[in-house]
Amino acid sequence: MLSIGLDIGTGFVKCVSDTKKIKFPSLYAYKWIEEWNKTKKLVEAVGYDAVELSVDPDVIVIKPVMLGRPVHEKAFVELVKKAVLISSENKDAIDSKPDHITIGLPYDAVSYRTSIQKMITKLYSPKACDVVPQVLGTLTDAG
């Protein structure tokens, strides 16, 4: 069983699982590369990889979260996927798909609760997906 706690923040994504704690920048970057046969290939990056890619002047960098609210759905989904992938690595399980995901949201972003739950459920089909006020996580952490 794999449980994951996520905080997809404006500045950083913070994630805690049964075995890991991770943090990376809340950035999504992409660019189109024209190949020899005139087709275009999309190159995408998230987190620190997005920071590295951003040195290229042709790259578009997106901050998918503002004040705890998702403002770019595709980029937000990519942040979630990256956090779940990293926190699931090295798990001693055949299926590293999370059983339980909890996401903290700022109190002012409560209107996004249902859409985020639906997105997580569509991506991973966890047994449980909770979207809770961030203050609850802070209080729990403080004991």
Image: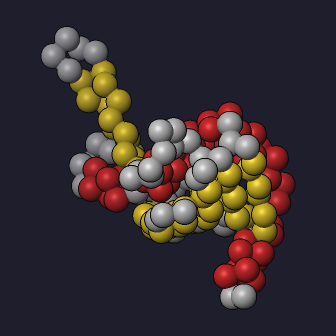
Residue 61 to residue 121: above or below: below
> How far across and how far down the image is residue 21, in percent?
48, 68
Of residues 88 and 15, which is closer to you in this image? 88
Question: Colour scheme of this structure image?
Answer: secondary structure
What is the count of numbered marks?
0
Residue 96 to residue 104: above or below: above
Of residues 126 and 112, which is closer to you in this image? 126
Residue 124 appears left or right of 38: right
Residue 115 to residue 130: above or below: above
One can see residue 77 in this view? yes
> How far across and how far down the image is residue 120, in percent?
67, 43
Residue 138 appears left or right of 84: right
Residue 137 to residue 19: above or below: below
One can see residue 54 in this view? no
Farthest-out residue, left: 36
Q: Residue at 48% x, 45% y: name it.
A: 93
Q: Residue at 58% x, 52% y: name it.
A: 2
Of residues 57 and 10, which is closer to you in this image? 10
> How far across and how far down the image is residue 17, in percent?
54, 62
Farthest-out residue, top: 37
Residue 115 appears left or right of 126: right
Q: Quadrant of residue 119?
A: top right
- Location of the C terminus by quadrant is bottom right
> How far across and how far down the image is residue 46, in percent?
41, 50
Residue 27 appears left or right of 45: right
Q: Quadrant of residue 10?
A: bottom right
